[in-house]
Image (cartoon, coloured by chain):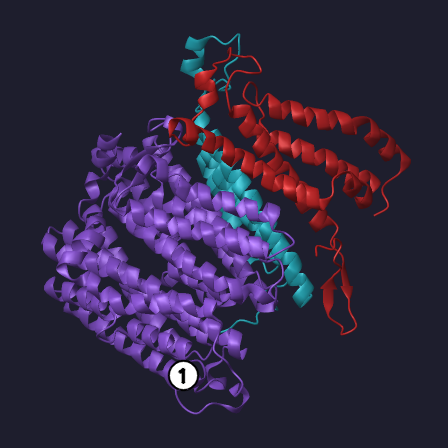
Amino acid sequence: MKGMTIIVKTITRWVKLFIFLFGIYVTLTGHLSPGGGFAGGVILACSFILLTLAYGKEYALSRLSLKTAKSLDSIGALIFLLTALIGMWVTNVFFDNVLQKLFPGTDFMLYSSGFIPLYNIGICLKVGAPLFVTFIVMAAMRIRINDKGEREIIQEEEEE
Amino acid sequence: MMNSILPLFVAIPLGASFLIALVSRKRKLPADIIANLSTLSLLVLSIIIFQARGVYKIGGWLPPAGINWVLDGFSNLFLVIINLISICATVFSIKYMKHYTGVYKYYSLFLLMTAGMNGVVLTGDMFNLFVFLEIASIASYALVAFGGEHEELEASFKYLVLGSLGSILILLGIALVYGMTGYLNMASISKAISSSGIGQVHIFAALLFITGFGIKAALVPFHSWLPDAHPSAPAPISAMLSGVLIKAIGIYSLIRIFFNVFGMNSIFGGMLIGIGILSMVIGVFLAVGQWDLKRLLAYHSISQMGYVILGIGLGGFIIANGGSLIVASLAFLGGLFHLLNHSVFKSLLFLCSGSIENATGTRQLKEMGGLLKKMPVTGTTCTIASLSIAGVPPFNGFWSKLIIVIAAMQAGYYIIGFVTILVSFVTLVSFLKVMRYSLWGPVSGILANVKESPVLMVLPLVLLALLCIGMGVIALPGVTEVVLKPAIEVLVRGAEYAGYVFSQL
Amino acid sequence: MVFALCFVLFLTGLYCILTKKNTVKIIIGLSIMEAGVNLFLVLLGYKNDGVVPIIDRSTDIVHFLAYSVDPLPQALVLTSIVIGLGTIALGIALCMRLYVKYGTFDIAEIRRLKG
């Protein structure tokens, strides 16, 4: 994949950062306004997918390699689980929002709901990274015919 | 004690699953260690809380707004079964999965599936049940395709389409129930339904649930994916799928919803009996003609699930018709005991088939022969499991089948009892064929160099075989009170579920 | 009336699964069915003249309580959309793998398993 025309590349260069920041904004204010981890994660993944479409796969993968994306996926899930377990450790209740009970914030402020932004960050990583990986793996799959006349997948990424 | 342990049943396997995906991508050893430790700890925990009862509020939110988990005798029984078979399967996997690539993905999915099943049996909330059910199902679709060859992919595709169809029907049923009652909490729904009575929409939802969970449990009109999917998976996964997955996400949910949420009546009971007999008879007759060992075992899973549903449906039918409670609890005892036995001997059989396949490289019965001499431990355990599933006296399968027959006879349904005995004979014939071709007889030429499987593969086989011999004890009066009686109570007093949950809050 | 349309969508998906021979089309049928159920679920929470169930600084609580739509089905639908996404991604991945192995998307030709 070589990428698209100069027009697309230029515009992508301008908007990619804004899309990325918007994704972070949606994630972090998920407890105040519509959005949250899932939507934010999808927007973040979209910014990388836009890079892939405009500049080609190699460029996007040089920014976020598949290996990193897969690790982020697991890290997101572990963040979610650990925050849930903190509640269990402190008050013996799974998913207890301990932070909110100990340090209640003011309503409608960024810090107002304890662990919920942390959950959103976990979900954001968990949704965004696999979406990007899925897109890359599916869109960039190539098939070749090997010597025996069988079809086989060209292994794009040498994964040991 | 319960409060500090219960969430771990989902948290440990989920955490271990993502941890394996994170740290163990290059080497296999950490994945082996983490997976085995987590399943071992789950088994220990499930035994520790076997006597505990109670309701757990996730995040401290009260139902009906919050999600609650309910631990009663029925859930406890399933927790022990699931985690017992998981540990056997993971120990078996250490050597068996040696030749596959990407073993960390296998363990990761395996633990996700375990987390899903543990969640399904613990939860007291309809939508939470759906979510856990989907976690377990999606992991199992991927595990069936794990080999990546022609047959595996085809079977997995078939399983995925039918399985998702079942999930969508279940979701529609949940949506209808939510629309009718305004609750998602099982106890609240149960209370609402018992005060409003069962209307047409409830019956429609019930039919959707029977179809959806019937697909998940591979009961007969919906069974066509099972004989493809279960043999295609790697052997430990076949053992998990046949041994616990169809029970945990199919039979368990079906029973929980019909006995505790909708309340049992004679129409539902009759339907369960009908489906049970159909599964029993059709499954076993399809099994007789098979020559592929794992495919034969898969058909027997359908047939044996028929026994379970028959026993439980019979009990429900007797109670709904105002029959004697003693006979009904006998039928429940038979059904649940058979469920317990089936998960032990069927996983043993699938693990044996994996051990045989690993050593000989074939699954076709006609190419085997004389394995009892070549692989003494696998051969012996396989014999024990075969006799057990066929219902030969000293082994566990005999006692549970006997109890179902006695219950049917005492309730006056002689035809059902007769059919049950007939199916048992056909099962015996089918497994005599397995033993005749694979275990006994002369050693066929190509198998001359076959050796016994390594110790780590044999260990779970021996453990399960000992359970097969010893589990007949559970039918004895003193032991039943401890092991199966709490689960039977949940079924006999199905309508009291809501009161129980609210009293525990 | 609206519920009937959801059911039509559901049946369209079912028809697609039952009659189409192309593996990708079967997966599309699944996603149509799921869309029908999700639509049904989210419509269950609908109220006439309803307001969005989000409390803001300027929200009048009394009016909000009387007119806000039921937020629970929306949460459920979000969850079930995510689950559907997972299923469909897995399904499409399987279709691609099947194409690699069999060289076709036609389920009539993908039949090695019998009996």
Q: Which chain is red?
A: A
Name which residue lies at 59% across and 29% down. Answer: A121
**Vertical placement of B458 versus A124: above or below?**
below
User: Residue, x 52% and y 73% (percent of image)?
Assistant: B358
Q: Would you identify the image quadrant in which residue B399 lies?
A: bottom left
The residue at which mark 1 appears reads as B372
In the displayed structure, B127 sits above or below B417; it is above
SS state under label 1: helix
In front of the other: B227 or B317: B227
Picture coordinates of residue B261, whole percent (x, y): 28, 41
Numbered disc 1: what chain?
A: B
Is there any visible trace of residue B8 in the rendered image? yes
Q: Residues within 10 Å of mark 1 (few under 14, many from 20)?
A: many
Where does residue B154 sit, x and y in percent of width and height? 57, 64
| Residue B412 image-quadrant placement | bottom left
Q: Residue B413, relative to residue B189: is it above or below? A: below
Q: Nearer the viewer, residue A73 or B323?
A: A73
Identify by letter the chain in cyan: C
Q: Is residue B233 visible?
A: no
**Chain coloured purple here:** B
- Residue B245 place in picture, x, y as percent: 41, 56
Q: Amino acid at mark 1?
A: Leu
Location of the C terminus of chain B by quadrant is top left
